[in-house]
Image: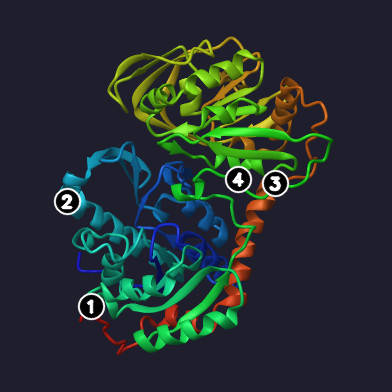
C-alpha cells in the first residue's frame, strides 16, 4: 500500500518516553471536541502493559493501550480497537505479546520483529485510512522518540507513519527533566531531510517557573530550526490518572491525597512488580480522601501499612518468583497472617492461589502460589476479554474489565463478586481478597464498601470514606484540564492551520554541527 490520504490530521511525537505525548494528544482531542470537530485518537503501535478493553458495536473487541481509552473519552467516543491497532505487551526484556486489532496473535522478540513488520504496517495504514474516512480529524500519538535511528527502517508509529500518511508532526519535550532545547533540536537534527520536512514545530511540557526566563531559549530554538514553538505547557498537579508509561510509576505516592474525612488515614502499599500490568487500578483507591497509596519494592514498607495490594502482572509466575527472591512474598504472608487486609488483582489474585498451572505465559508448568486463597489457576491459550458486571458486599453494584489468560479451575466457597447468573468471581477468605477484574474500584459504591471493610480489618476505626467521590467525574476533569491547558497555553490557531493544511512548505533541513 503506497500511503494514506484523508482529512485533517496531526502526529504528536516526543523527545523521550513520558515526555507528554499521550496527555498532549488527549488535550488536543478535547479541545477539538469542544469545537464540535468529529475527532478520533490513533496510536499505530503501543508498547505497554497498561491496557483497556474496547468493545465494538457488533460485540467484538479486544484490548488497547490505556492512553487511547483516555483519549477516546476526550473525543466523546467509546474506546475502539481501531484507535490502537498494534499493542505490544512486554513479558520480559526481550519478548512481547503481540495484540493486533485487540486480539493476541503470538509473541515476538526484537530479533524476529522484522518478520511481521510488513503485515503490521498494512494493518496500521488500513486502519488509519478507515478512521480518516469516518472522522474529520485524527490526532495520532507517536511512540518513544522519532529519533531512534537504529529503529527507523522498521518504524510504524513515528516518522514512518507520518511519511506514509502525509501527517504534520509536532515534537513535545519534557523540560522538567532538563536539557529540553538540546532534546528538541537533537531530535530534529537526527532525522533525514524527508522526515524533517514534516516536523512543523515544538511544544515544551511540564514547565515550572518564570516564562519570561524561558523565552530567549524559545526564540533561539526558532532561529536554529526555522520552526515555531506552539506553546509552553505548565506543570499541573492534577494530571496523574490513567498513567500509561511505566516511568510514571517509579516508586512514589500516587496522586495528591486529599485530607481524611475522619480522624485516621488508610495507608496502602502496592507492590511494584517488574512486569506490572494495569497498575491504574491503584489510582481509583488513591482518589479517595484519606487514602495514601504508595508503590514499593521494599519488604520493610509492608511492615506498618494497613492494606497491601498485589496488582496485575504480564507474567504471573515470573513475578511471583521475583516476590520470593526479594523477600516480598514472606512480607505479604506475614501481613495476611497478622489479620490485616490483603488484595490481589488479576495476576496478583493468581499469585495468592495455592497452585498455578502455566504452560502459556512462562511455560513453567505447575508451581505453588502463596497459598493465601483456596484457589487453583490454570492458564488457557485464549485470553479472556470482557466487560463484566455484578454485585458485592450484599448487593453493591460493581463493573470492571477482564484481560487474562489465567482461569480459576478450583474456586473458593465465598466469591468476592456475584454475577447476574448467580455464579461467583474472585474470592474472600477472612482478610484476604482476590479478583480477576481490573477497573472494579472505579465503581464508587464498591470502592467505598471495600475500603470500609479494609479499614475495619486494619483496626482503622477513625477512617471514613467520602460519600461524594466520583471516579468518572475525576476522569472527565482530567481531560477537561488537558483541554484547558491546550486552549490557554498553545497557539491553537496555528495548530488548526497545521491540522487542516499539513506541514508548511520549505521548512529548512537541519544538520548536527561538527568541528
Residue 52 is at least partly visible in this image: yes
Disc number placed over residue 114 in the picture, else none: 2
Name the residue: 43% across, 64% down: 134
Foreground: 414 or 246?
246
Q: With 398 as the anchor, is 362 left or right in this view? A: left
Residue that carries the numbered disc 3 in the rendered image? 257
The answer to whether 414 appears left or right of 512 in the picture is: right
Of the image marks 3 and 2, the number of the one nearer the N terminus: 2
**Coloured how?**
rainbow
Asked if residue 465 lies left or right of residue 127, the reply is right
N-terminal of the pair, mark 2 or mark 4, is 2
The numbered disc on residue 254 is 4
The numbered mark, 2 or 1, whose residue comes first in the sequence reads 2
Quarter of the image holding residue 415?
A: top right
Q: Kindly indicate whether the residue at mark 4 contacts the one at mark 3 (C-beta within 8 angstroms).
A: no
Q: Which residue is mark 1?
A: 194
The residue at 26%/66% (across/down) is: 160
> What x and y, as percent, mark residue 497?
46, 84
Amino acid at each position: 500500500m503506497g500511503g494514506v490520504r484523508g482529512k485533517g490530521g496531526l502526529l504528536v511525537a516526543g523527545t523521550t518516553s513520558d515526555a507528554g505525548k499521550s496527555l498532549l494528544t488527549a488535550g488536543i482531542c478535547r479541545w477539538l471536541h469542544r469545537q464540535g470537530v468529529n475527532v478520533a485518537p490513533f496510536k499505530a503501535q503501543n508498547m505497554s502493559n497498561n491496557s483497556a478493553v474496547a468493545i465494538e458495536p457488533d460485540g467484538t473487541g479486544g484490548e488497547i493501550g490505556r492512553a487511547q481509552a483516555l483519549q477516546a473519552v476526550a473525543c466523546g467516543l467509546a474506546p475502539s480497537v481501531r484507535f490502537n491497532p498494534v499493542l505490544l505487551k512486554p513479558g520480559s526484556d526481550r519478548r512481547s505479546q503481540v495484540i493486533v486489532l485487540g486480539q493476541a496473535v503470538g509473541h515476538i522478540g526484537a530479533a524476529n520483529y522484522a518478520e511481521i513488520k510488513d503485515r503490521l504496517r498494512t494493518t496500521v495504514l488500513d486502519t488509519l485510512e478507515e478512521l480518516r474516512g469516518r472522522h474529520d480529524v485524527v490526532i495520532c500519538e507517536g511512540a518513544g522518540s522519532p529519533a531512534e535511528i537504529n529503529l527507523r527502517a522498521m518504524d510504524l508509529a513515528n516518522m514512518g507513519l507520518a511519511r506514509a500518511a502525509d501527517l504534520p508532526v509536532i515534537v513535545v519535550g519534557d523540560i522538567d527533566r532538563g536539557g529540553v532545547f538540546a532534546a528538541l533540536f537533537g531530535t530534529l537534527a537526527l532525522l533525514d531531510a524527508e522526515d524533517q520536512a514534516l516536523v512543523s514545530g515544538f511544544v515544551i511540557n511540564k514547565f515550572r517557573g518564570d516564562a519570561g526566563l524561558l523565552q530567549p531559549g524559545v526564540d533561539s530554538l526558532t532561529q536554529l530550526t526555522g520552526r515555531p514553538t506552539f506553546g509552553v505547557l505548565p506543570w499541573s498537579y492534577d494530571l496523574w490518572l490513567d498513567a500509561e508509561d511505566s516511568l510514571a510509576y517509579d516508586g512514589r505516592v500516587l496522586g495528591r491525597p486529599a485530607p481524611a474525612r475522619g480522624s485516621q488515614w488508610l495507608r496502602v502499599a502496592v507492590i511494584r512488580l517488574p512486569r506490572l500490568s494495569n497498575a491504574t487500578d491503584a489510582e481509583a483507591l488513591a482518589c479517595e480522601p484519606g487514602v495514601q497509596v504508595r508503590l514499593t519494592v521494599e519488604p520493610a514498607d509492608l511492615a506498618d501499612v494497613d492494606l497491601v495490594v498485589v496488582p496485575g502482572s504480564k507474567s504471573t509466575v515470573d513475578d511471583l518468583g521475583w516476590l520470593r527472591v526479594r523477600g516480598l512474598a514472606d512480607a505479604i504472608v506475614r501481613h495476611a497472617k497478622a489479620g490485616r487486609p490483603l488484595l490481589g488483582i488479576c495476576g496478583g489474585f493468581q499469585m495468592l492461589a495455592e497452585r498455578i498451572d502455566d504452560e502459556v505465559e512462562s511455560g513453567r508448568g505447575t508451581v505453588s502460589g502463596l497459598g493465601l486463597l483456596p484457589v487453583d489457576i490454570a492458564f488457557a491459550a485464549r485470553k479472556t476479554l470482557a466487560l463484566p458486571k455484578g454485585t458485592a458486599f450484599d448487593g453493591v453494584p460493581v463493573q470492571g474489565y477482564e484481560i487474562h489468560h489465567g482461569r480459576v479451575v478450583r474456586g473458593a466457597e465465598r466469591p468476592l463478586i456475584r454475577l447476574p447468573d448467580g455464579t461467583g468471581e474472585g474470592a474472600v477468605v477472612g482478610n484476604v481478597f482476590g479478583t480477576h477484574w481490573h477497573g472494579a474500584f472505579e465503581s464508587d459504591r464498591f470502592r467505598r464498601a471495600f475500603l470500609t471493610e479494609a479499614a475495619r480489618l486494619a483496626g482503622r476505626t477513625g477512617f471514613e470514606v467520602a460519600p461524594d467521590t466520583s471516579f468518572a467525574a475525576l476522569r472527565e476533569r482530567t481531560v477537561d484540564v488537558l483541554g484547558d491547558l491546550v486552549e490557554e497555553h498553545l497557539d491553537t490557531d496555528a495548530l488548526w492551520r497545521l491540522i487542516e493544511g499539513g506541514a508548511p512548505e520549505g521548512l529548512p533541513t537541519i544538520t548536527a554541527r561538527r568541528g
